[in-house]
């Protein structure tokens, strides 16, 4: 699986490794460099690929991070959309040394950060360091030290960095460096989107129920849209998106 993921070359490749029923499956995720416990965008893609064959409806994915339900719906045109429900998330303070080293690897100054959105480690199936840029221009100008950031992420057990700029209370622009996976940048990151939903809830930036819109991939020429939903009665985060066939 690792060799296949390296040959494919995408940020993650999903593999169905077990099947209790056509809609109840075991899924593993590999980057070109290593296995990861959970990948949101590959979950959405896998569910849509299955729904193309089996029809819309509910699926259950057993992953290394836990059980992830996914629902696929079709609009009036037949276009498919998948919504995953994360494992239970949590958010923790980011160690000061980790933040300092991350900024050095990114070649960002402390003044490049938005003081209203403090650094945190957020988890919703995988660990992400959330750093908020003070301006859209800072987020757009991403030229980091690949090896230095990869070393930090391995030592801190981080899957990606979730770099964000808040356009409004519920609209974010995000970028996700992924050097530990052998990829400069992830064009769409469902696991990090779920983690950001947990972060936004933990900091009280919005009141549930709420829907967040995340723009990702624009700065690398692969624009995508992720929808993050927070509910009052459930700490888990829901992430929705569509899929596209890449030949």
Image (cartoon, grey):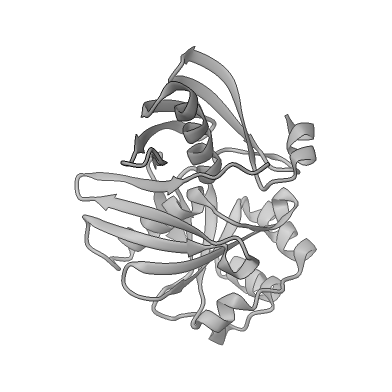
| Front residue (pair 129, 242) | 242
Q: Residue furthest top?
A: 20
Q: Residue furthest front?
A: 77
Numbered circles on residues, count: 0
Give above or below for 26 relative to 217: above
Residue shown at the point (44%, 72%) measured from the top left = 118
The location of residue 90, given as percent across then percent down, is: 40, 50
| Front residue (pair 175, 180) | 175
Residue shown at the point (35%, 47%) measured from the top left = 237
One can see residue 184 in this view: yes
Which quadrant of the figure contains the C terminus? Answer: top right
One can see residue 85 in this view: no
Instruction: Determine the image quadrant of residue 58.
Output: top left
The location of residue 174, given as percent across then percent down, is: 51, 66
Which quadrant of the figure contains the N terminus? Answer: top right
The location of residue 163, given as percent across then percent down, is: 54, 67
Residue shown at the point (48%, 42%) measured from the top left = 125
Give above or below for 73 relative to 215: above
| Front residue (pair 232, 190) | 190
Judge from the rendering whether residue 146 lies leftward or rightward of residue 91; answer left or right. Answer: right
Judge from the rendering whether residue 186 lies leftward or rightward of residue 52; answer left or right. Answer: right
Q: Residue furthest bottom?
A: 111
The location of residue 164, given as percent across then percent down, is: 49, 69
Give above or below for 41 relative to 133: above
Instruction: Determine the image quadrant of residue 42.
Output: top right
């Amino acid at each position: 699986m690792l060799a296949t993921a390296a040959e494919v070359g995408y940020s993650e490749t999903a593999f169905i490794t077990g099947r209790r029923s056509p809609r109840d499956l075991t899924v593993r995720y590999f980057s070109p460099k290593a296995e990861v416990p959970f990948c949101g965008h590959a979950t959405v893609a896998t569910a849509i690929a299955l729904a193309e064959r089996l029809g819309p409806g509910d699926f259950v994915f057993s992953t290394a991070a836990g059980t992830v339900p996914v629902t696929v719906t079709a609009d009036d045109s037949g276009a498919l959309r998948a919504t995953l429900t994360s494992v239970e998330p949590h958010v923790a303070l980011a160690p000061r040394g980790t933040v300092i080293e991350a900024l050095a690897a990114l070649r960002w100054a402390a003044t490049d950060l938005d003081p209203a959105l403090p650094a945190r480690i957020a988890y919703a199936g995988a660990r992400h360091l959330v750093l908020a840029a003070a301006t859209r221009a800072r987020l757009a100008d991403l030229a980091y030290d690949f090896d230095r950031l990869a070393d930090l992420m391995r030592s801190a057990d981080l899957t990606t960095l979730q770099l964000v700029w808040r356009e409004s209370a519920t609209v974010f622009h995000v970028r996700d460096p992924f050097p530990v996976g052998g990829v400069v940048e992830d064009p769409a990151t469902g696991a990090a989107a779920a983690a950001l939903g947990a972060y936004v809830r933990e900091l009280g930036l919005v009141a549930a129920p709420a829907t967040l819109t995340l723009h990702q991939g624009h700065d690398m020429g692969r624009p995508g849209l992720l929808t993050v939903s927070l509910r009052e009665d459930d700490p888990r985060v829901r992430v929705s998106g569509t899929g596209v066939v890449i030949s």
